[in-house]
């Protein structure tokens, strides 16, 4: 009887033995971390997009509204996939891992497509035209010129009654050029592709580890 009990202690349940495999432990830890980050970022984006959506209902073009609705739906899907990832890393259920992996692929492709669309939009935007000539002030005591169509034109300088005001010429210096915007969009797309590639790799590594070690 003692030998039988010792034999039972020496042979653990084979259905739980794979949980102590180092590859499975490392894979589930990494997936849990990445899924938690996805859940956090997507949740914050959902709140931000919802606030912007409320504002766009009262003002904003239809194209901007549709793009915001699309982004909100993607972030809601990101929250769902992130929740599935955390659950799959805890239970190591094969179906849950499978659902998380392919849900992550869909969300990642949508995020990358959004960044790619932004890059194309910025790259194909018409460059800024030549600056309009600056009108001369009407008198030596005024930096403003009145136009019947445009009202007071303050392009010539700052309001003398507001010493802390910044002239429009100074503000124009801080406007980024189209080349700068394209470079920023390219960098954002590159970083997005690198991050999502890492997430895909870790998710498929967990799926492979679970499929190879789970008892059939």
Image (cartoon, rainbow, N blue to C red):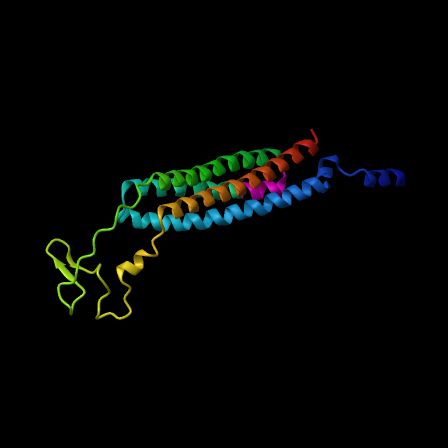
Q: Give the position of the N terminus as an image quadrant.
A: top right
Q: Residue furthest top?
A: 216
- Decide whether the magenta segment is chiefly helix, strand or loop: helix
Q: How many marks?
A: 0
Query: Residue 204 at x, y = what percent?
Result: 60, 35
> Looking at the picture, does residue 96 appear above or below residue 49?
above
Q: Point out the stretch of residues depicted in magenta.
A: 83-92
Q: Residue at x 55, y 39 (%)?
A: 197
Q: Is residue 157 left or right of residue 68?
A: left
Q: Residue at x 36, y 43 (%)?
A: 68
Q: Is residue 4 left or right of residue 117?
A: right
> Looking at the picture, does residue 169 appear above or below residue 162?
above
Query: Residue 133 at x, y = what percent?
Result: 20, 53
Who is closer to the viewer here, 146 or 107?
146
Do we see residue 27 in this rendering? yes
Q: Residue at x 55, y 37 (%)?
A: 100
Query: Residue 184 at x, y = what percent?
Result: 43, 47
Do we see residue 93 in this rendering? no
Q: Give the position of the C terminus as an image quadrant.
A: top right
Who is closer to the viewer here, 6 or 155?
155
> Looking at the picture, does residue 86 appear above or below residue 216?
below
Q: In this view, does 69 lie to the left or right of 209?
A: left
Query: Residue 136 at x, y = what percent?
Result: 17, 60
Q: Which residue is drawn at 53% across and 33% down?
A: 102
Q: In this view, does 181 lie to the left or right of 99?
A: left
- 131 in magenta: no
- 86 in magenta: yes
Quadrant of residue 18 within the rendered picture: top right
Quadrant of residue 32 within the rendered picture: top right
Who is closer to the viewer here, 176 or 30?
176
């Amino acid at each position: 009887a003692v030998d039988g009990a010792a034999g039972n202690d020496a042979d653990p349940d084979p259905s739980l033995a794979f949980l102590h495999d180092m590859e499975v432990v490392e894979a589930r830890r990494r997936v849990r971390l990445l899924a938690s980050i996805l859940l956090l970022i997507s949740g914050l984006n959902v709140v931000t997009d919802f606030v912007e959506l409320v504002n766009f209902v009262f003002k904003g073009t239809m194209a901007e509204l549709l793009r915001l609705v699309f982004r909100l739906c993607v972030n809601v899907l990101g929250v769902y996939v992130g929740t599935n990832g955390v659950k799959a890393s805890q239970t190591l259920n094969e179906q849950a891992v499978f659902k998380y992996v392919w849900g992550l692929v869909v969300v990642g492709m949508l995020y990358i497509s959004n960044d790619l669309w932004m890059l194309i939009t910025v790259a194909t935007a018409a460059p800024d035209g030549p600056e309009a000539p600056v009108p001369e002030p009407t008198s030596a005591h005024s930096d403003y010129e009145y136009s019947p169509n445009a009202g007071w034109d303050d392009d010539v300088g700052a309001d003398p009654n507001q010493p802390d005001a910044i002239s429009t010429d100074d503000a124009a210096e801080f406007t980024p050029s189209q080349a700068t915007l394209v470079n920023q969009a390219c960098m954002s797309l590159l970083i997005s592709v690198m991050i999502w590639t890492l997430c895909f790799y870790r998710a498929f590594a967990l799926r492979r580890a679970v499929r190879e070690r789970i008892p059939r």
